[in-house]
Amino acid sequence: MKKFSIVLWVLAFLLVLFFCGTLPCFSCSTFVLKCGNHLIFGRNWDHYSSKGLMIVNKRNIAKTALLAPPEKSARWISKYGSLTFNQIGKEFPYGGMNEKGLVVEMMWLEDTKYPEPDERPALMEVQWIQYQLDNFSTVEEVINSQSRIRISQSMSKLHYLVCDRSGNAATVEFIDGKCVTHTGEDLPVAALTNDTYDSCLELLQAYKDFDWEKKIDHTTLRSRDRFIKIARRIEDFQSENIQPVVDYAFDILTSVGAGKVGQHCTAWSVVYDVKNLQIYFKTFENRRIRVVKLSDFDFSCDTPSSVLDLNQDLEGDVSGDFFEYTSMINRILIETVFGIYEEVGFLPEISEFQITFLANYPETLKCNK
């Protein structure tokens, strides 16, 4: 039991360093473009390393959230398959899209305060993403689920942008221990950076009568500056219906990305074509745009899962370049990523037991057909 708790503490500590590190460098951005038949979700992951896997997650897998007692771990059986972007191992994604077109992405939010422990079963803040992709197809379902589950108390402070195939979008934040959402008319700008949605919207309203290009700092691209810049680009898109839309989304991501500053970079940029169930992406190590089509994947749990190295020397349609997932592949990812952060002094040395525990966790989740 003690070892189990230590492993979970280490994972939480890793998340803290990934997401906060030196706060000014953490500049993730998300947005939704919607006009006519176009429904596009853009996302920058700005941090220290672009190492990672895209992972095929299967339907009908019985899962138990990875939490230490006395927490009551959430349990569920995955209803939908998904493709996710993972850096700290399978089942702990930073974002992704499921076969119904639900997209969930996270960003750091210093103001986050999760609910106090109560009778609801709980799960970790990144496993919350997998839970939503496993179980739901609409934004409404995601919002309603917050009354049934709870994010465990954690040092990693996140908020989320969610979008479904019908075009509905929502922010999900945890402020003063309560779940706060914005959707429909309460979400006039479908974007999220690293400040609360309300504070960004308030600043946007204050700038509406000014030359915003002169007001924002283009050299540092602080969170609220990025939000304002994205908001203006969304407005331009809606008024001009700019084509091609995927290229326009990548252009927005480039304009608000970290690029390369010291040890920090835009690790990866992702554009989800939600209506067409396609995912376009590029990484710091491979700037060529690649695309995968969810329709090309078998999400039944009686076949092995598969993965793609995000930095593999490929371009174009890479749906056929995935290879079979194994616990060893998961272990190599975890060892590599932990090693990078140990090398730059952000993490202590991780024990073999801790690495093995995390690498083998997905093996405890079984097909329920």
Image (cartoon, rainbow, N blue to C red):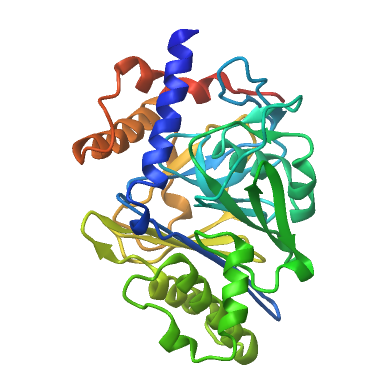
Q: Is residue 296 left or right of residue 24?
A: right
**Who's the residue at 43% across and 45% down the image?**
322
- Residue 245 image-quadrant placement: bottom right
The quarter in which the C terminus is drawn is top right
Q: x%, y% of residue 335?
A: 30, 30
Q: Is residue 310 above or below residue 329?
A: below
Q: Does residue 353 appear in the picture of this structure?
A: yes
The image quarter in which residue 184 lies = bottom right
Instruction: Examine the rendered structure and indicate whether residue 253 appears above or below residue 61.
Output: below
- The image shows residue 205, relative to residue 49, as above or below, that is below
Picture coordinates of residue 182 (x, y %)? 72, 61
Q: Position of residue 225 (x, y in %)?
A: 46, 73
Task: State left or right for residue 183 relative to residue 130.
Answer: right
Q: Nearer the viewer, residue 97 or 141?
A: 141
Between residue 209 and residue 76, name the one nearer to us. Answer: 209
Residue 233 point in image, percent of width and height: 53, 82
